[in-house]
Amino acid sequence: MKISIKPVPFCLLLLLAATSALAQSLDELRQSGALGERFDGYVEALDASAQASANAINGKRRNIYQQRASEQGVSVEQIGRVYATEILEDAPPGTRFRQANGVITTK
């Protein structure tokens, strides 16, 4: 079964990248190696200092994914995987990415 996901509105993409008034931006955390992206559309703290940021970002993403899944009649997991591809494409060089098999690669 092929899943067709509607284009993502720009405002939702901005929300995906937003952090909640934390000292470092998402791109800075990615470039420093403290935060990585995952195959399921969520971030992962690769350094304990980034855990609060990861929790905040993932909470926002989870809300967006749930909304989109409800609108399109698909699972939250399917939406997350589609977003993961888009997020990785837009992520800066040096971003670490955990694949579904657990292997971490660097963009």
Image (tube, grey):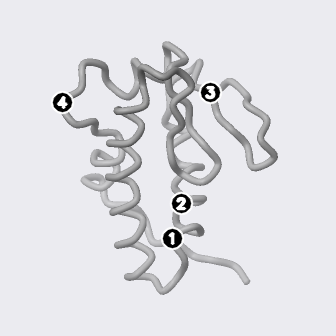
Residue 12 % position (x, y): 30, 55
Q: Residue furthest top?
A: 32
Q: Residue furthest front?
A: 48
Mark 4, residue position: 21
Q: Amino acid at mark 2?
A: Gly
Dot 3 or dot 1: first in sequence order is 1
**Foreground pick, 71 / 21:** 21
Q: Amino acid at mark 1?
A: Val
In the drawing, does residue 53 fall left or right of residue 99?
left
The local crowd at label 2, few if under 14, some if 14 to 19, many if 20 or more residues have their Cα within 10 Å, is many
Q: Amino acid at mark 4?
A: Ala
Q: Is residue 107 above or below residue 55?
A: above
Identify which residue is drawn at 68% across, 24% down.
106
Mark 3, residue position: 96
Q: Which labelled disc corresponds to residue 59? A: none
Q: CA distance from mark 2 to mark 1?
A: 6 Å
Dot 4 or dot 3: first in sequence order is 4
Element under label 1? helix
Task: Kindly indicate the quadrant of the structure image that contains residue 36.
Answer: top right
Identify which residue is drawn at 22% across, 36% down.
20
Q: Which labelled disc corresponds to residue 76? A: 1
Element under label 2? helix
Q: CA distance from mark 4 to mark 3?
A: 23 Å
Mark 2, residue position: 80
**Foreground pick, 97 / 3:** 97
Dot 2 or dot 3: first in sequence order is 2
Q: Amino acid at mark 3?
A: Arg
